[in-house]
Image (cartoon, grey):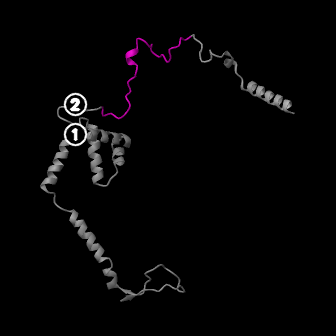
């Protein structure tokens, strides 16, 4: 059976587009070569794991023992699970009731702990502080003898500010007065020039 459908865009009958006739047999064979290549590529990826693949997977499972915090381990395994299954890590974080940024930080800390253990020298203690957030400890906690609780400056409570001691006129400075003085000076120069 011959079908006279337009292969190109739909146009009115008065247009100059020529319709190409094709049969159902033609339509059945369209794209067969491309689909055969895609099928072959798909089945090539579906292979049984080798002994080396299984050994590497078991070794990576052992790396989790280097992460002492359970929440960091869970975030790392969930991130790997989401990456393998084409899911979003942020959706898993929301299901767990944590913010996605918190989940990302936990995952990064777990990876950093594993990298420190794998890359360390056996005779050198080279662990650094893993926490990427700023510490909450006060800087002057050892100086409570010098600085009283709640002190924000070294000046006595009754002392006056000393910023203007070199020029006492700055305490009573008025911008309007200064502009008026400049205006008077300009007018005086104009009178002298005229």
* Residue 178 found in image quarter: top right
Q: Secondary structure at mark 2?
A: loop
Which mark, by number, is residue 125?
Answer: 2
Mark 2 neighbour class, 10 Å CA radius: few under 14, some 14 to 19, many 20 or more: few
Provide the major secondary structure of the magenta segment: loop
The residue identified by callout 1 is 119
Is residue 99 shown to the viewer in this render?
A: no
Residue at horizontal 53 percent and vertical 13 percent from the top: 155
Find out whether residue 154 is within the magenta segment. yes
Looking at the image, is mark 1 or mark 2 earlier in the sequence?
Answer: 1
* Residue 85 found in image quarter: bottom left
Q: Secondary structure at mark 1?
A: helix
Q: Report the magenta residues as a range.
A: 129-157
Seen in the picture, residue 185 relative to 97 is either above or below; the reply is above
Name the outermost residue toward the bottom.
1
Is residue 126 shown to the viewer in this render?
A: yes
């Amino acid at each position: 059976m011959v079908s006279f459908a337009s292969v190109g865009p739909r146009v009115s009958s008065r247009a100059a587009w020529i319709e190409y006739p094709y049969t159902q047999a033609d339509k059945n064979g369209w794209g067969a070569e491309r689909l055969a290549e895609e099928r072959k590529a798909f089945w090539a990826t579906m292979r049984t794991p080798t002994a080396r693949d299984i050994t590497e997977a078991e070794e990576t499972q052992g790396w989790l023992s280097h992460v002492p915090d359970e929440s960091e381990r869970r975030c790392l395994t969930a991130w790997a699970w989401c990456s393998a299954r084409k899911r979003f890590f942020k959706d898993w974080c929301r299901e767990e009731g944590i913010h996605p940024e918190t989940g990302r930080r936990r995952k990064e800390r777990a990876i950093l702990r594993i990298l420190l253990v794998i890359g360390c020298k056996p005779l050198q203690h080279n662990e650094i502080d893993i926490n990427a957030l700023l510490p909450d400890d006060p800087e002057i906690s050892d100086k409570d003898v010098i600085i009283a609780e709640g002190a924000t400056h070294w000046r006595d409570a009754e002392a006056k500010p000393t910023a203007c001691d070199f020029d006492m006129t700055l305490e009573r400075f008025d911008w309007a007065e200064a502009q008026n003085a400049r205006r008077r000076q300009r007018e005086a120069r104009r009178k002298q020039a005229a």
